[in-house]
Image (spheres, rainbow, N blue to C red):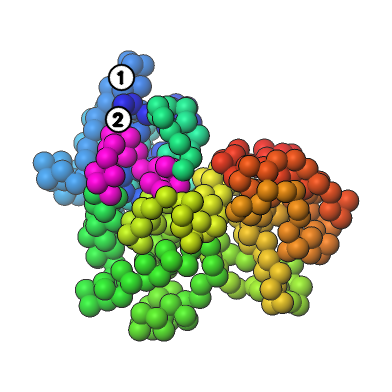
Amino acid sequence: MEIERTLFPQLTAEMDRRFVSVLVGPRQVGKTHLLHALEREAAARGRSTAWFDLENPEHLPLFNRENRDVVSFLRSAADVVFLDEFHYLKDAGRLLKTLHDSRAGPKVYVSGSSSPAIHAHLKESLAGRYRLSIVHPLSFRDECDQVPGAAFADHLVWGGMPGLVHERTPADRMALLRDVVSAYLLKDVKSLVREENMRAFNSMLVLLAQAQGSVVSAANLAREIRLSEPSVARYLDILEATYVCHPVHSHSANLANELKKSRKHYFFDLGIRNMLLRDFSAVGSRGDRSSILESFVALAIIRALPPNAELRFWRTRSGSEVDFVLVKNRIPHPIEVKAGARTAEIPPGLRKFLAAYPEAPGAIVYTEGCAGTAECEGREVRFMDVSEAEACPFLTDT
């Protein structure tokens, strides 16, 4: 089954732009699939194309030459050049900069399972010369539009890794998710973490999965896995740099009782999180049901964040909290997730937030089946089904 990705129209429009189009994201989220779709689109427009896979032993020697020779080779290769797994390319940023700056250079698309090295290449050499697109797993809306029989309860268990579309049995789905985790550890992490610390790194992944949606500190993780706090902080940075775990920071207007340096962490896919926990039971029977629903909302918003917005959470030292605060154009928009709520009752933490932040224009409470509106502190609070979080009104409201 061919799944059309929501990023495809944007990437197609970039074909006529000079900048280097960079696709990053975790393994097996569909980066190579998108490049192949773009290759077909370029050919349909009558443009010559060249494809190079830097994991392919037959292609890699072509790039083990002086930069000037590689640039000369790529300039004459085709109108549109595709470099898959470009993080294996030595001095990638400088090479792409030279190719971009050459007058007769081709349009270039590159993809990679992001790493700190990629970010260094982009920032140091390609500043102002590239457009970054993060490729995420399939959203639930993608599945509803294109996958027959898509169900919200299944998405919460298995997540949205595109390969799952072709795996129909639970055993095959678990095997695919296990392979994604293994490939990440073997290919993306092994070179970044000392061999003797790999077991501790794996333990940290499980602890983060268990605590997803809760405030987690590097100090507490360090005590649990018996590593130094700087090592744990570095490992958390690796998870963020490889787009495997998204940190969400606390929101604060410097009120004395607000937590200011706390973070939550959300794995990029619910199926990957469940794989780490070895738990694929139905969500309705699970003790972490609230965490799963909160995670779905977090990932839905993170995927759609525009450049003028960021996702945070709010908590005070006295225990008042709001699950998320979408800060857009520096204006806070509080969002609460209440599993099992059946009436439009405004949570106490939301009331306190709206009282503390009069500039907040309103709030959303995501529930399971409760819809409607209420008023708090003179502002509207919308109650919406959690499955609708991928169309969060705060992302589109002006």
Residue displayed at 33% across by 16% down: 44
Residue 253 appears in which quarter of the rendering?
A: bottom right
The kind of residue on which mark 1 rests is Ala
Residue 274 appears in which quarter of the rendering?
A: bottom left
Residue 120 appears at what percent x and percent y?
A: 39, 59
Q: CA separation, marks 1 and 2?
A: 11 Å
Q: Nearer the viewer, residue 127 or 293?
A: 293
Q: Quadrant of the C terminus?
A: top right
Magenta stretch, main secondary structure, is helix
Give the labeled residue for mark 1.
43
The secondary structure type at the circle numbered 1 is helix
Q: Specify whether residue 157 is painted magenta.
A: yes
Relative placement, left or right, of 258 versus 134 is right
The kind of residue on which mark 2 rests is His
Local crowd size for mark 1, using a 10 Å CA cut-off: few (<14), some (14–19), many (≥20): some
Q: Quadrant of the N terminus?
A: top left
Residue displayed at 76% across by 53% down: 345
Residue displayed at 19% across by 46% down: 55
230 is higher (above) or lower (below) than 368: below
- Which mark is drawn over residue 36? 2
Relative placement, left or right, of 212 versus 257 is left
Q: Nearer the viewer, residue 60 or 380?
A: 380
Q: Nearer the viewer, residue 240 or 281?
A: 281
